[in-house]
Amino acid sequence: MDKKLLEEIKKKLLAKKQEIIENFEREHSSEISEIESENVIGDIVDEANSVYELQIFNKLSEKEQNELIEIEEALARIAEGVYGKCVSCGNEIDPKRLLAIPETKKCIKCKQLEERNKIRLG
């Protein structure tokens, strides 16, 4: 995959992740103050940040949690060098699809098949 395209997609993923977190922070500022007051300051700042992110994650809606998981999985696929390949069939995912839905992990054919199966199974 083109490095420039990959960088653009990575920026989109990071921006989506940041947007979810910022929306949560705006909507739950009082809860965040409570979380921040529980964090340890000092030598373990990184650990505190991880705890902070985990606490926020646990307070997100199921939809927001799923979105963050999909974003993290896409970022991991980028790091592993397998981003852009369908996890079902292994074929390349259309770059236009990746730009539109950067967290996608399936090509359009496999996604349509998955959706049809969901409908059939109820």
Image (cartoon, rainbow, N blue to C red):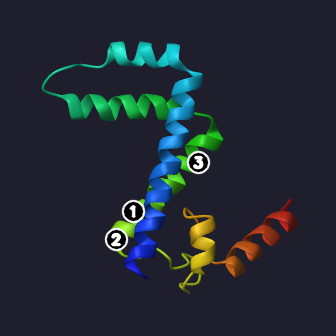
- Residue at x 62% of width, y 76% of height: 96
Amino acid at circle 2: Glu
Residue 32 in percent (x, y) is at 46, 19
Q: Earlier in the sequence, mark 3 or mark 1?
A: 3
Amino acid at circle 1: Ala
Residue 100 vertical placement versus 57 (above, below): below
In the image, is 87 to the left or to the right of 32?
A: right
In the image, is 50 to the left or to the right of 24?
A: left
Q: Please name the residue that numbered disc 2 is placed on.
A: 80
Amino acid at circle 3: Asn
Does the rendering let one see residue 59? Answer: no
Label 3: element kind: helix
Q: Please name the residue that numbered disc 3 is placed on.
A: 66
- Residue at x 48% of width, y 50% of height: 15
Measured Cα–Cα span from mark 3 to mark 1: 15 Å
Say if mark 2 contacts mark 3, CB within 8 Å.
no
Q: Few, some or many C-alpha atoms within 10 Å of disc 3 (few <14, some 14-19, many ≥20)?
A: few
Q: Residue 76 — which label? A: 1
